[in-house]
Image: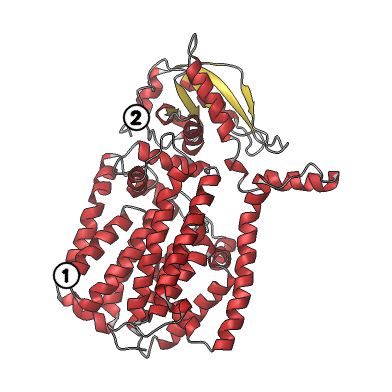
Amino acid sequence: MLRSGRVDHRPQNLLGNPWFWFFALLIVTTVRFAVAASHPLFETECYYWMYSQNLGFGYFDHPPMLGFFLHFFNFWDPPSSLAARLHCIVSHFFCSIFLYYYGRNLFDSAKAGIGAALLFNIIPIYSILAIQNQPDAPLMFFWCATLLCFERSVSTGKPLWWILAGFMAGGALLSKFHAVPLVGSLFLHLLFFGKDRKHLATPWPYIGFAVALSCYLPNFIWNAQNGWITYEFQFDRLAEAGEFKPVHLLGVFLAPLLLLSPWVYGLVAVVATRIAKQFREGLSRGMALSFWSSVPLFLFFVYVSFSDSVKIHWTAPAFIGLLPAVAVTLQQWSGRRRFMFCSSAMVMTLLIYGYLVFPFLVSQSLPNSWLPPTLKAEFDEHLDKDWTSQNYGFDRLGKFLKEQLDAGGEGDFDLIASWRFDRVATAAFYAGEPDRAFVPAFGDRRGYTLWESPYIRSGANALYVSRSRKSESRTEREFEDLRDCFNQIGDPIVVEAPFEGHPFREFEVYPCYGLRKDVLIRLAKRDF
């Protein structure tokens, strides 16, 4: 180990040269562009894309940073899958750069930085989030930037780094509430790590914290003006503790097997064991910061699992801070042991990627007309349950809706409506009419509506996209409330969107006439 503050600049072979991996990163990023452009958007991705069409300082389910990221990269007209996902790919690219410098500085070794960036690019969950339009993209960007700036702050003590760390932490808070444990954890590091405790005697950590809160202030004010709706949505699961289910707790610990891949999960366990053994003797700054930037967030979701399920990607940021420590641990093993481990790890990683990518290949390219009846039935069943199948068919639906909206004449339509935000956003995205999206009162949350549209007016007519007949059971309540919103509902029009001879995707579109005035009152954006 070199002395603190010194980086290993000794001549490296090709695999130890950062520039080699930088060009490899450029190639991988180019591949991500192609993948992102070739696959349709998920419904939630379309909903988040609507943020960029309706910029504000908050939304009912998340802070606003994703909307600003999307708006900044909104070069395309009409929009496309790549347009909605471009910011994710760019963010992931810069996360890799940040992690290289973070790992290099933290452990005084360029190899540690290369290893951290390499792990970030081969771990399945981070690769998936690199091409998914989710709030996790800006969160991870600011998360990695915060770690880098904080490490520079405690290493150099320079005020500029403390201020930059505050700005980056503020950006993370404006991205997703996962950043709250991160900010608290960094203060815990200062409090409990003796060598860095001296910084608490200076004003700069507090100034950085004030900068972070100032950055977050616009979203706080927005929530105050809108009935604290984001906090209510996000923290209901904590306030209304449900029944404890062991499977939820077990899932928090087992999900990283797929999230990280088994071999990285094993390395994380090795690092955790090493940290536990060194805790009493005294951790190095690298191990201490790895611990405090990761463990508190993970423990928070362990707590959440006692009353609710935890989605698989929620814990993903918790492992970012551990990546340099994982890379260093792997490098310290003997050459033969490292070779055997990396070889088996590569096989397992390819198997996991194969499992994740297989549905995309099946859905887009594999022929099936030649299959015997028994296998064809199994193929159909797989395709019907395929987790990517919800993407398909909306282009056909969007074309139909666009034709109806442009037709004009008697009983012309003004709006595209559906029972929830993500469904109507997807329909409007593929119709190329984001301003016409509308969610009736029963499909939103406490009268909140995301869209301010001149087409939402008393007496407006709408094309209502019902729930899919095969993927979700239609409820009577949906249509009872729909009749309360419109004066008249016509007979459904079935829009078929077959794929390779599989008519599993059908949409029922109901012509709805005469939007009632009282519905508009209920949908007033600040009428809580």
Q: Is residue 314 visible?
A: no
Instruction: Give x and y (percent) for residue 399.
Output: 55, 27
What number is the disc on residue 452?
2
Residue in the picture at 25% in, 78% down: 155
Image quarter of the N terminus: bottom left
Vertical comparison of 421 with 152: above or below:
above
Give the residue type at disc 2: Glu
Vertical comparison of 188 with 358: above or below:
below
Vertical comparison of 52 with 246: above or below:
above
Q: Badge 1: how crowded within 10 Å, few (<14), some, or many (20+)?
A: some
Q: Secondary structure at mark 1?
A: helix
**Going by the image, does 207 lie left or right of 389?**
left
What number is the disc on residue 495?
none
Could you say which is closer to the camera, residue 149 or residue 336? 336
Instruction: State the image quarter where residue 283 is shown.
Output: bottom left
Give the residue type at disc 1: Pro
Name the residue tied to disc 1: 159
**Going by the image, does 87 lie left or right of 410?**
left
**Going by the image, does 429 lie left or right of 395?**
left
Looking at the image, how many numbered discs can be counted on the residues?
Answer: 2
Q: Is residue 206 visible?
A: yes
Q: Of the residues under marks 2 and 1, which one precedes in the sequence?
A: 1
